[in-house]
Image (cartoon, helix red, strand yellow):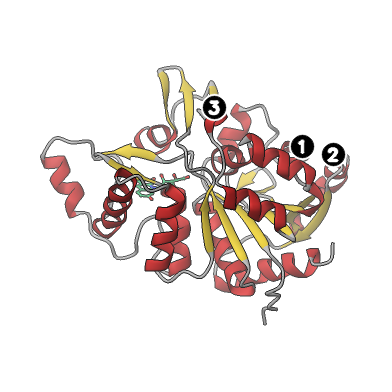
Amino acid sequence: MPISVSFILITLIAGGTGSVKLARGLSKVTEDLVVVSNTADNIWLHGLYICPDIDTVVYGLSGLLDKSRGWGVMNDSFVFMEQMKRLGQDYWFKIGDKDLALHVARTHFLNEGKSLSWVTEWIRKKLSISTVILPASDYHFETRIETPVGEMHIQEYWVKNHAELDILNIMYEGIEKAVPSPKTLHAIRNSDMIVIAPGNPISSIGPVTSIPSIRMELESRKKKVIAVSPLIGNQALSGPASKYLRAMGIECSPVGIASHYSNIASNLVISESDKEYENRILNYGVDVYKTNIIMENEQDEIKLSDYILKTFNNA
Ligand code: FO1
């Protein structure tokens, strides 16, 4: 049985597919959850502003997510995409017909001058999601990957080129202008716990924690910050984390995760099968907690969330 500790305010720093399971679990064990979502994989396509990580959280928390893909709406159709293909338009990024409605509505409001935070709140209310979802920033900045054949947006690297090209560098272009919304900073400043989801440290979490004012806030509150490892041994729980970590010269193991987060997190939750890394993680001044971090179903999501609440409440 999950415990309910509604007086504890938790901020979850999240990306997309790798993070949504913990967002879902935490939303079931506490009412006071704020999810700060990565925005650096946002992309303009077909005149529409698409926010994949925000939308994965939105669909995950509203029960609409296609869980097998980890993105988009379940039981969606792709008639729009087929027609775009017929018209000779780009069709490498598969926008489902139901998903399309969200991008059209969002872009309409942005064109009217509304902020991304405003639109995200509007979506949340329309889809009856109780958890607050905040974009890391209302200002566009993007993760770009430098490869031997040129530099490209992360979606072009991951989806169009299937992450096959070598990586020379990964940059967050425009991050210096990426001011977080006041609500985001307020949530981090006032949370009893700040949880870093087991998302990709470079492409999902890194853009959020590299925003200068967010980073400063996390550094000053790092005792309250709990990161959940996105790796078991040297294997990523999902997506291309190992490739991105190696490209950035970070050891692909829970020790690499600890070293990468050591300035902003004093606590790391790792798999119980990763005991061997414990002493090396402690050397970075990061406390280690071991449990099952694989979330294959709703019960796993709630169990890990409960574990985090019980372990770090009063810490
Ligand atoms: N991921 C894919 O691998 N292929 C797609 O065609 C694709 C389309 C897509 C459409 C909307 C959306 O919200 C997400 C989508 N994703 C797709 C997922 C997305 O590329 C990544 O999961 C995240 O950007 C990772 O941060």
Count the numbered circles shown: 3
The answer to whether 43 appears left or right of 258 in the picture is left
The answer to whether 171 appears left or right of 2 in the picture is left
Question: Dot 2 lies on which element?
Answer: loop
The answer to whether 178 appears left or right of 103 in the picture is right
Quadrant of residue 88 within the rendered picture: top left
Q: Nearer the viewer, residue 83 or 11?
A: 11
Say which residue label 3 marks. Answer: 170
Could you tell which of marks 2 and 3 lies nearer the N-terminus? Answer: 3
Does residue 209 appear in the picture of this structure? Answer: yes
- What amino acid is found at the position of numbered circle 1 in the picture? Ser
Question: Dot 1 lies on which element?
Answer: helix
How would you rate the neighbour count of disc 2 (Cα within 10 Å): few for under 14, some for 14-19, many for 20 or more?
A: some
Contact (Cβ within 8 Å) of mark 2 with mark 3: no
Residue 27: percent from left, percent from top: 58, 69
- What amino acid is found at the position of numbered circle 2 in the picture? Tyr
Q: Is residue 7 above or below residue 169?
A: below
Quadrant of residue 67 within the rendered picture: bottom left
Q: Is residue 259 above or below residue 97?
A: above
